Image (tube, helix red, strand yellow):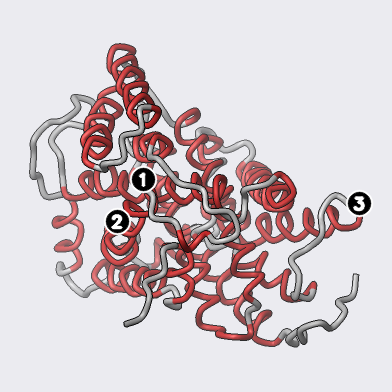
Amino acid sequence: MTKRPASALRNFLAGEAGGGVLLMVAAALAMVMANLPGGASHIYHAMMETLTGPILAPALGPMTIHLWINDGLMAIFFLLVGLEIKREFVDGGLSTWERRRLPFIAAGAGMIVPALVYLLVTTGQPGLARGWAIPAATDIAFAIGVLALLGRRAPASLKLFLTAVAIVDDMGAVAIIALAYSHGINLWALGGALILLTGMFALNRAGVKKLMPYLIGFLLLWYLMLLSGVHATIAGVLAAITIPVRSTPGAPDQGHSPLHRLEHLIHPWSAYLIVPLFGFANAGIALNGDAMEALLSPLPLGVAGGLLLGKQAGVFGSIWLAQKLGIAARPSGASWLQIYGMALLCGIGFTMSLFIGALAFPNAALLIEETKIGILAGSLLSALCGYVVLRLAPSVRPGAPTAG
């Protein structure tokens, strides 16, 4: 019998990021269905907007399949994100300030520079400034999926560093969603969520290890957040913080705490069902003449430019500057060219960018479609360029000195 790894992150990397590949297939399928000839393409959009009910929040109206995916199932994805963040801070690659320094620097610059590029391109366009955060996110599943296609040509240190940057990036994206894209705050519901969250922390402090009380709390927290006006998916990250974890220094694969168990429980569902479903529900774009013309509009250009140019400049430039200033050393066993290729892959902003795009322009179907065009163009170009650079970059022999 083979021993099952206790770390979902390492299992994810060891499994060649099958979830990322499945996400690519789901997105491609959505594109095909949205571009079927005749009236067949309407089947895709009609399916996504099928009313299922009930009315959970007056602001949302009757629930549709699209809402259940974006506001419901994605809360489970954010729960997994929160679990990964907590475990990495307590027991993983971000457990010390020395380890956190470079990922925080790279992720921070990798969010700020794309936002500035977007604002520069869209300046003077009324209403478009709300989309500044769209190119600020990195899609970890997609990026690791591309790295997996490279096999041993991508050093393990790059995979782990990219994962750390993406985790910090996710933290920033969650904060942006909570602070910048919340609207019509219901203080009563928000107060109830705060009381419930305090109770979940109390369970942790009391030593409760069973998962069921926390899962019930997560469902209630999700509903209260849905009513509050703060996006409901934030409930996943908040609930994850309350889940107990047992620190196992030096042996992170040996943990069997509630956090590890829950991570293993939901990881396959998130990677192989929820995220691909989200990609399928949100990537369908009609690539007609209007779409091609829209690609040169300020909104898609700003998003694509932020992802392709802003991300690589922010991530690579900050790593180079941090090493030159002696603040932090770059990932070991990787050349500057390989680090540049990884920085390009950070421009794959698919899942989180689509998510933020829908929040930035609610009830503006045309702007959302233009946003999707920019995200797909920027992400695809970043993926192709990153793949080519890493494919052609000479491998660094173990123990060989690296320039710089």
Question: Residue visible at 19% across and 54% down?
Answer: 48
The quadrant of the rendering that contains the C terminus is bottom right
Residue 153 image position (x, y, % from top left): 63, 85
Residue 129, how many percent across, how many down? 56, 36
Tell which of 208 and 330 is nearer to you: 208
Q: Secondary structure at mark 3?
A: loop
Judged by depth in the image, the label closer to the viewer, 2 or 3, is 2
Q: Amino acid at mark 2?
A: Ile
Q: Residue 132: give x, y in percent of width and height.
A: 57, 41
**Residue hosting label 2:** 266
Q: Tell me whether circle 2 and circle 1 mark residues in contact (CB < 8 Å).
A: yes
- Examine the image and state in which quarter residue 394 appears: bottom right
Residue at label 1? 79
- What's the residue at 22%, 73% (across, down)? 36
The numbered dot on residue 372 is: none
Q: CA gap, disc 1 to disc 3? A: 37 Å
Residue 244 vs 25, above or below: the answer is above
Is residue 258 visible from the viewing direction of this image? Answer: yes
- Rendered image: mark on residue 325: 3
401 lies left or right of 13:
right
State which tag comes first along the sequence, 1 or 3: 1
119 and 317: which one is in front?
317
Name the residue at 15% across, 69% down.
40
Q: Between marks 2 and 3, how big is the CA–CA gap?
A: 41 Å
Q: Amino acid at mark 3?
A: Leu
Q: What kind of element bears circle 2?
A: helix
Please tell me which residue is depicted at 65% across the width and 77% down the height of the picture: 155
Indicate left or right for 235 with 144 as reference. Answer: left
